[in-house]
Image (cartoon, helix red, strand yellow):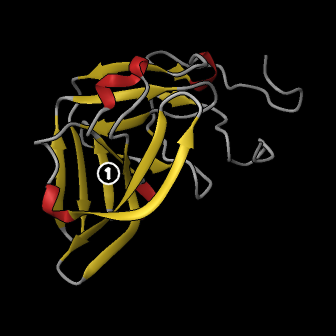
């Protein structure tokens, strides 16, 4: 059930509604090409991403080890807790003299149901130069905490965005 003041957008052909995603979140393999650019360099490039889909959120894409430039991802002391996935640890992304602070996170020991996410990294699209899914530039989810990737094939409204009251 959605809050009374929020009306989900009806998806068109080839679209998914974030309101049809489950809670707890679902994890699925994603063969689409995911590319992340920071400081003019590709820091992640994969066709083996994992998508996490949760009610009212655009998908969050996780890049598996070997498909991101590990040397560019520097651990920070910041952590957060997800009631489903467990403790997340954050990374700065550093390329040359540029740093994107706490621009990525990972679950080093996720809950069993989300074991596939172990050592994969998720990246905030609003904190890097650009993120792409199959060549389409992603729009970041509103709100400093959320890391969803909005593409034209996903409808909202999305948690944290206008009309959702940030709940």
Q: Quadrant of residue 102?
A: bottom left
Q: Nearer the viewer, residue 78 or 152?
A: 78
Task: Please give left or right for residue 71 compared with residue 12 in the image.
Answer: left
| Residue 12 coordinates in the image, percent (x, y) | 54, 19
Callout 1: few (<14), some (14-19), or many (20+) C-alpha neighbours within 10 Å? many
Residue found at x 61% / y 19%:
23
Point out the image quarter for the C terminus: top right
The relative height of residue 48 versus residue 79 in the rendered view (above or below) is above
Q: Is residue 58 above or below residue 123?
A: above
36 in relation to 112, above or below: below
- Residue 155 is left or right of residue 167, and the answer is left
| Disc 1, SS | strand
Residue drawn at x 42%, y 64% as measured from the top left: 77
Which residue has dot 1 on it?
Answer: 131
Question: On the rendered structure, is 163 left or right of 118?
Answer: right
Q: Position of residue 129 (x, y in %)?
A: 32, 65
Residue visible at 52% across and 22% down in the picture = 25
Q: Which of the 4 image quadrants contains residue 61? A: top left
Residue 27 picture location, percent across and down: 40, 20
- Determine whether 80 is above or below 108 in the image: below
Q: Look at the image and tell me in which quarter the N terminus lies.
A: top right
Determine the residue positioned at 81% across, 46% down: 165
Q: How many marks?
A: 1
């Amino acid at each position: 059930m959605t809050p009374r003041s929020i009306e989900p957008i009806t998806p068109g052909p080839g679209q998914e509604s974030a309101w049809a995603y489950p809670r707890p979140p679902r994890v699925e393999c994603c063969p689409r090409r995911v590319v992340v650019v920071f400081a003019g360099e590709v820091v992640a490039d994969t066709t083996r991403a994992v998508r996490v889909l949760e009610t009212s959120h655009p998908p969050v894409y996780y890049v598996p080890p070997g498909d991101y430039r590990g040397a560019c991802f520097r651990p920070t002391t910041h952590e957060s807790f997800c009631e489903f996935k467990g403790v997340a640890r954050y990374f700065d992304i550093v390329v040359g003299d540029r740093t994107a602070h706490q621009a990525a996170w990972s679950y080093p020991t996720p809950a069993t149901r989300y074991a596939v996410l172990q050592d994969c990294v998720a990246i905030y699209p609003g904190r890097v130069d650009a993120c792409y899914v199959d060549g389409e530039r992603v729009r970041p989810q509103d709100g400093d905490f959320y890391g969803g990737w909005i593409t034209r094939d996903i409808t909202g409204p999305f948690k944290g965005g206008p009309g959702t009251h940030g709940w």
